[in-house]
Image (spheres, rainbow, N blue to C red):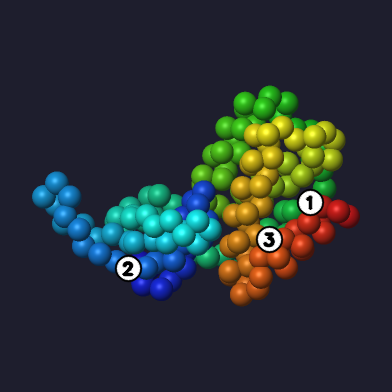
Amino acid sequence: MFKIGDRAVYPAQGVVEIKAIEAKEFSGEQNEFYILRIINTDMTIMVPTSNANTVGMRSLIDNECIQKIFGILREKKPINGNIASWSRRQKIYQDKIRSGDLIEVAEVLRELYFIKEDKDLSYGEKKFLDHARKLLVQEIAIAQGTSEEQVAEKVENIFLH
């Protein structure tokens, strides 16, 4: 259970701040809701506290996970190559980003950087790359208490070498 002021991750949206926990009545039933402010967009959403786990809301990653993510980003290009069909890759990327698992987001980012080495990315691929990078950089920066610029630079340097 999260408390007011905590930061957490809401899948595909990124880091959120719990602004309030409120009881609201819908259809004659009383439920508790987290009132979440999405840090990236400053948008506010409500999530039933009983559904937080179901929707994949989770705590920020720890240093051990951050090290694992940077290890994934540093992995060399897969020998098997990439799935050729964009529609199939798009579905896989979408599922990984929606999972809220930052390790899966890192895999999407790494794969798109590898594809980018061989060809220009399509508009859709660029959108997934930007979204994955934003989610990853933001959470790591907040978890480490550092700036997004520093994390973004570290990520970019991995792919330049």
User: Can you identify the residue that label 1 sits on?
Assistant: 75
Disc 3 element: helix
User: Can you identify the residue that label 3 sits on?
Assistant: 68
Residue at horizontal 82 percent and vertical 48 percent from the top = 76
User: Can you identify the residue that label 2 sits on?
Assistant: 20
Could you give the CA–CA distance between mark 2 and mark 3, rounded to whole angstroms?
Answer: 32 Å
Residue at horizontal 17 percent and vertical 50 percent from the top = 26
Sequence order check, earlier mark of 1 and 2:
2
Disc 2 element: strand
Judging depth in this view, the residue of 131 and 60 nearest the camera is: 131
Sequence order check, earlier mark of 3 and 1:
3
User: Is residue 51 toward the left or the right of residue 130 in the image?
Assistant: left
Q: Position of residue 56 (x, y in %)?
A: 44, 52
Q: Rate crowding at label 3 as few (under 14), some (14 to 19) or many (20 or more) other CA atoms within 10 Å.
A: few
Residue at horizontal 63 percent and vertical 49 percent from the top = 132
Residue 80 falls in which quadrant of the image? top right
Q: Position of residue 74 (x, y in %)?
A: 79, 55
